[in-house]
Image: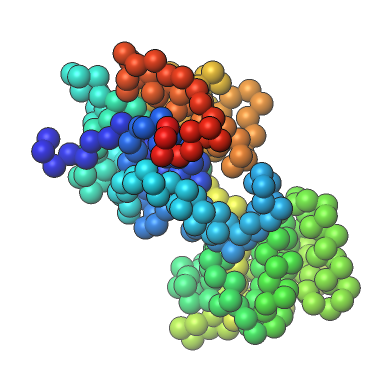
Amino acid sequence: MKDTIETDILIIGAGPVGLFAVFEAGLLKLRCHLIDILPQPGGQLTEIYPKKPIYDIPGYPSVLAGDLVDNLMEQIKPFNPGFSLNERAETVEKQEDGRWLVTTHRGTKHLAPVIFIAGGLGSFEPRKPPIENIEAFEEKGIEYFVRNPEMYKGKNIAIAGGGDSALDWTIYLADVANEVSLIHRRTEFRGALDSVEKVYHLVEKGRVKLIINAQVVGLQGNGQLESLTILHDTEGESQLKVDHFIPLFGLTPKLGPIGDWGLSVDKNAIEVNTFDYSTNVPGIFAIGDINTYPGKLKLILCGFHEATLACQSAFKIVHPDKKLSFKYTTVTGIEGM
């Protein structure tokens, strides 16, 4: 195993919760290595909505998702974690010495006594509308995530959906794009009432075109998206000229290979003990959106709490003969822990 990466805690998922776990582990002088299928750290915050503001991070009245990731990376820099990016954890095997051997789909081997699964929603894919030739226009006018809002500056865009994401991006892009149309199959929205009111206010001011009781059924363009065919419940078909179409119907989460690791799973989430967020398999913990327990809230700040408690139990596994004494960073600082 000379080419195997060895660490104290192997973290599967480099989203915000996985990154914060590195910090809490570092305070206990535990080394961490992270595996993530995405090409960069940050998880959904980086991949899906880096420019979207987050309002429920303590100490930040508002922080862009991408900036939060940058800050977390800066916070864990003193602990020098390792990363295996663009790799998916495939198999896990218990070794004779009690450690876990995790191999990725690229064949990279990792050895650690403790595993933290911090995979967020797991392997996720966008829910695509059932339009016959939609794949032909992907990345050619159709995007399922808003990664860089500036690419829509001065453009005519259409957003489809009735949830928070569709409402939030309609509000945000109304200040960026030349024209924003929001298309929804119903008259009522599933998102926050405040966001719905903001959208209707923008409609009244002529900054958003709202098309309800309708759905996109056709796409046209010569190598690049040029227009949509919209089917109204009562008015029949119409054409809408656009440069971009952003269908936001949510994500389909999948545990992927982790689902075959013998963990107790309920509705695509891993069941944990809230004492320390351990799973039914000793030495494996699940933190963040990928776990489930009574009263679970899928919030980043809750994942931070879960990571903190999991690290306390991880220390006892890594150093069974050492006594763990809790100390405040205000007293010890970072380097002194």
Instruction: Name the residue: 45% across, 44% down.
Output: 19
Q: Identify the image quadrant of the N terminus.
A: top left
Left or right: residue 35 compared with residue 264 = left
> Can I make out residue 240 in this image?
no
- Residue 273's place in the image compared with 223, above or below, is above
- Residue 22's place in the image compared with 222, above or below, is above
Q: How many marks?
A: 0
Which quadrant holds residue 154? bottom right
Q: Position of residue 256 (x, y in %)?
A: 39, 40
> Of all residues shown, which one is farthest toward the left?
2
Q: Identify the image quadrant of the C terminus.
A: top left
Left or right: residue 120 compared with residue 97 = right
**Which residue is at the front of the view, 275 or 234?**
275
> Can I make out residue 295 in this image?
yes
Q: Position of residue 84 (x, y in %)?
A: 30, 48
Q: Position of residue 296 (x, y in %)?
A: 63, 30
Left or right: residue 115 compared with residue 221 = left
Q: Position of residue 290 (x, y in %)?
A: 50, 36
**Which residue is at the front of the view, 56 or 222?**
56
**Which residue is at the front of the view, 104 or 113?**
113
